[in-house]
Image: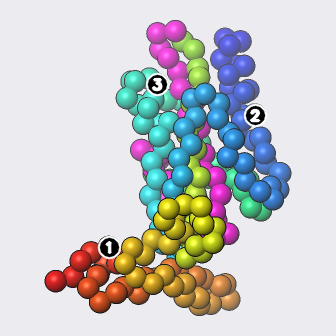
Amino acid sequence: MSTMIAVLLIFFMLIHAGSGNNEQCSSSMNDGTNIIIDRYVPLGQHFNFSCDAYERIKQKYLQIISVQWLYRCQKDSFILDNNPNSRFVYDQNEYFLIGYDIQSIHEGILECHVLYKNSLTNESNLESSTINLKVQDCNEKIDSNASHALRNPCQFGQCQVVSAKLGGIKHEKLYCDCFDQYTGLYCDGLFF
């Protein structure tokens, strides 16, 4: 019983750690069971990410006690509460995280923490996965060391950012202006 209380206490401490205002992100959050994945999302687009920790636990047929998504960086760090009016919501059955209309200010770290119980040993454990969310905004200077520009998804075309104000809030969206023989959202299809 005391082991379970200690695990729950550690779980809640991990969830609430770093709840202050962070000016920069740290990508050195590896606790041994945590896998860090970089995901690129074009400016103004939506995404649907799975919780890798949840998938690993589900494959082992262990009892899942709770799943919690956290968002960290730039100006805030908070637990995602699955409010349907929020920019980030998650599916409560499979714990997919959905992000809507992602802007540059949303670049940060998304963490999925899974508290589970092994019914054979009656022990509770915590497993997590981390997604380093990077917004593609046509800024090739950031990725100058890469062999190709990760911030520019336009394969055969020119990357552009279009700005508009919606309800008094600045909204930006990435578009690709394709070369003549290419087509598709990111100019990746050859047009015949």
User: Which residue is more in the foreground, 79 or 23?
Assistant: 23
What type is the residue that disc 1 sits on?
A: Asp
Instruction: Measuring from the top left, give residue 27's x and y in whole percent.
Output: 67, 46
Q: Residue at 52% x, 9% y: name it.
A: 121
Q: Residue at 39% x, 24% y: name it.
A: 61
User: Which residue is more in the foreground, 134 or 81?
Assistant: 134
Q: Residues within 10 Å of mark 2 (few under 14, many from 20)?
A: few
Cα–Cα gap, marks 1 and 2: 45 Å
User: Which residue is more in the foreground, 140 or 33?
Assistant: 140
Specify whether residue 88 is in view. Answer: no
Circle number at residue 13: 2
Magenta extent: 92-121
> Which tag, 1 or 2, sits closer to the chain's start?
2
Instruction: Measuring from the top left, give residue 125's x and y in whole percent.
Output: 59, 23
- Asked if the magenta segment contains residue 101, the reply would be yes
- From the image, tell me which residue sits under label 3: 63
> Which tag, 2 or 3, sits closer to the chain's start?
2
Q: What element carries label 3?
A: strand
- From the image, tell me which residue sits under label 1: 188
Q: Is residue 35 above or below residue 7?
A: below
- Residue 32 falls in image quadrant: top right
